[in-house]
Amino acid sequence: MRAKGTVVDDARWERWAAATGIGFVVALIAGFAIAPPPPKLSADAATVAAYFADNQGAVLLSSVVSIGLGGVLLVWWLGSLRLFLRRAGTDGGRLSAVAFGAGLVALVGLTQFFAIRATLAFGLGGTVDASVSKGFFALAYAVDALNVFPVGALLVAASVSAWRSGAFPRWLAWLGLLVGVSRWVTGLDVVLKESILGDEGAIGMLVFVGVLSWIVAASVVMIRRSSAAAVAGASGL
């Protein structure tokens, strides 16, 4: 058996690692709040170019907070989520690996989205023809709209794993399944463009809030249960 002090340290690190999911949500919300709401995709090219030229500092800071801070926290949380699900899982870790991989793909998509916005603010806005800015803006919209698919895969895979193993309460597993599948459905906004399914639409915004709420709830459960798992693992039970 391991020393009691070591077990306590492990439990503390488990709690901090699980809490990074909450930190990611806070950083992402803060990042979006820093910059004023961007124009709609249907806005004319001059309006789009002017937005990024006039809000250069805010858009760049938004990118740093969301990805520089939030992205690091998300990677840490995904690793913690995979370990948490794998400990309780009965499938050899397949579903936890799918959830981890889908989360990384989603992070890449989110990074691309903010990188394009930063490029518009720092390298393009006010320096090239407005139509070029509008084209990059449309690219960012498409990246964001398509990113719903790996996000949905993360929630569905994690929830199925947790439902089978009991790692999460049943209500949280069902919520993850519902929100994950709904996130896939909102991907139809790629075809419909600026519909109620998009993140600025009523349904899309509701599902987006559902994703963030699920991450926070999952983090809280992980914080509460990781300590017990660490103690059990240390004692060989």
Image (cartoon, helix red, strand yellow):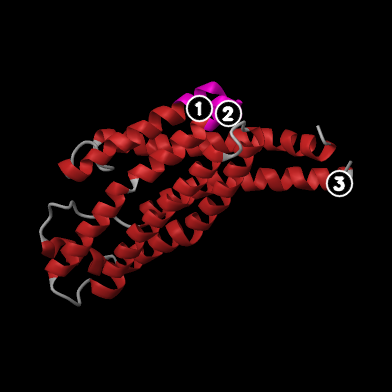
Q: Residue 166: within the magenta?
A: yes
Image position, residue 212 (x, y; %):
44, 40
Residue type indicated by callout 1 = Ala
Q: Residue 196 bears which disc, if any?
A: none
Locate residue 102 relative to residue 38 in the image: left or right: right
Q: Say whether disc 3 or disc 2 marks the residue closer to the N-terminus.
A: 3
**Mark 1 or 3, which is nearer the eye?**
1
> Whole-percent x and y of residue 189?
22, 41
Res 166 → quadrant: top right
Q: Is mark 1 on a helix, strand or loop?
A: helix
Dominant secondary structure of the residues highlighted in magenta in the image: helix
The tag on residue 173 is 1
Asked whether 1 falls inside the magenta stretch, the response is: no
Residue beneath disc 2: 168
Q: Which of marks 3 and 2 is in front?
A: 2
Q: How far apart are marks 2 and 1 (CA)?
A: 6 Å
Nearest the viewer among 113 and 108 is 108
Label 1 to label 3, Cα distance in Å?
A: 33 Å
In this rendering, would 83 be left or right of 12?
left
Report the quarter where the N terminus lies: top right
Q: In this view, does 199 lie above or below 125?
A: above
In which image quadrant can residue 135 be found? bottom left
Question: Which badge, 2 or 1, comes first in the chain's sequence?
Answer: 2
Q: Can residue 73 be seen in this view?
A: yes
Name the residue at the bottom extreme: 127
User: Marks 2 and 1: CB-CB under 8 Å?
Assistant: yes
Q: Name the residue under label 3.
A: 5
Kind of residue indicated by mark 3: Gly
The residue segment tinted magenta is 161-174
